[in-house]
Amino acid sequence: MRKTFSLSHEKIKTPRLIDAIKHEVKKYLKRERNKKLPEGIYFWDFDCKYGHTKESAKMIHVSALNKSIDDAVQLELANFYLEILAKPGIRTTKQLTEEE
């Protein structure tokens, strides 16, 4: 998902618009996580970017998506850019030391 979200609408009030944006992001993440995993892959991971514009977007963690949307509201931005790309995740194991 690569999308520029607008925080202004002629008929929809801002709090309702924010709820709709958060719901759309949550729905996209759920849809991607439910896709069949390829052989040797343990889970779906996500590369996320957030910015005021597409050019200024910076990497963020998946758990910071809602906070970033709230940040856009507090700064009273007209719109913001959000990019979420699914990638295969491989579980890494801890290396045991000789003491353990």
Image (tube, grey):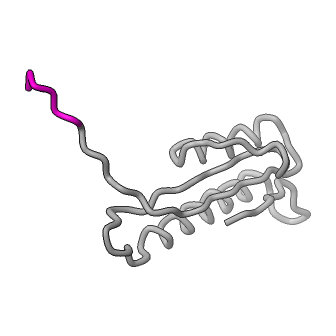
The one nearer the camera, 79 or 34, is 34
Nearer to me, 60 or 89: 89
Q: From the viewer's perspective, is residue 10 above or below residue 68? A: below
Q: Main secondary structure of the magenta part?
A: loop
Quick check: 3 left or right of 1?
A: right
For residue 88, side relative to residue 91 (left or right): right
**Residue 8 x, y percent position in the rendering:** 87, 56
- List x then y, in percent, for residue 66: 60, 46
Magenta stretch holds residue 23: no
As drawn, 26 above or below 96:
below
Q: Quadrant of residue 86?
A: bottom right
Quadrant holding the N terminus = bottom right
Find residue 4 and report its horizontal and vertical position in percent: 80, 59
As drawn, the residue found furthest toward the front would be 98
In the image, what residue occupies the spot 82% across and 42% down? 56
Part of the protein shown in magenta:
95-100
Residue at figure coordinates x 46%, y 57% from the top left: 45
